[in-house]
Amino acid sequence: MNPIIATLKEHNVSDEKVHELFQAFTQNPMMAMALVQQLGIPPEKLQALMGLVMTQPQLIKEAAVSLGITDGELEKAKEQYKNQ
């Protein structure tokens, strides 16, 4: 299992919330960051998760693909994030 999804599941984040988070990422990456902070993950675990994402950004794509989010949606999100 993708380590991002595994961490979310470890903290009892529902499948629906996981999908909502990654869908939000494709639409507005900054909004997704705010959603992550509202999931009730302890700060030390959240920091570790963010470190993992920063050092291995391909994990976002792997998780999104496993949730059925298309490459086109991911590319659009990447461009939006770069422009912010």
Image (spheres, rainbow, N blue to C red):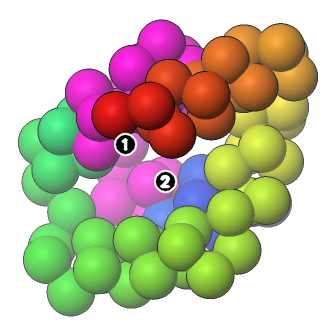
Q: Residue placed at 48% from the left, 13% from the top? A: 27
Q: Which residue is mark 2?
A: 9
* Image coords of residue 21 (percent x, y): 43, 29
Above or below — where is 48 with respect to 2?
below
Looking at the rendering, the stretch of residues picked out in magenta corresponds to 8-33
Between residues 15 and 46, which one lies in front from this camera angle?
A: 46
Residue nearer the viewer, 31 or 3: 31
Q: Which mark is residue 13?
A: 1
Residue drawn at x 49%, y 53% as measured from the top left: 9
Query: Looking at the rendering, in which quadrant would you find the N terminus?
Result: bottom right
x 70%, y 74%: residue: 56
Q: Is residue 56 above or below residue 22?
A: below
The prevailing secondary structure element of the residues shown in magenta is helix
Mark 2 → mark 1, Cα distance in angstroms: 5 Å
Position of residue 66 relative to residue 49, above or below, is above
- Is residue 20 one of those drawn in magenta? yes
Query: How many tags in the picture?
Result: 2
Task: Kindly identify the amino acid type of the residue bearing the numbered disc 1.
Answer: Val
Q: Secondary structure at mark 1?
A: loop
Tell whether 69 sits left or right of 78: right
Nearer to me, 76 or 10: 76
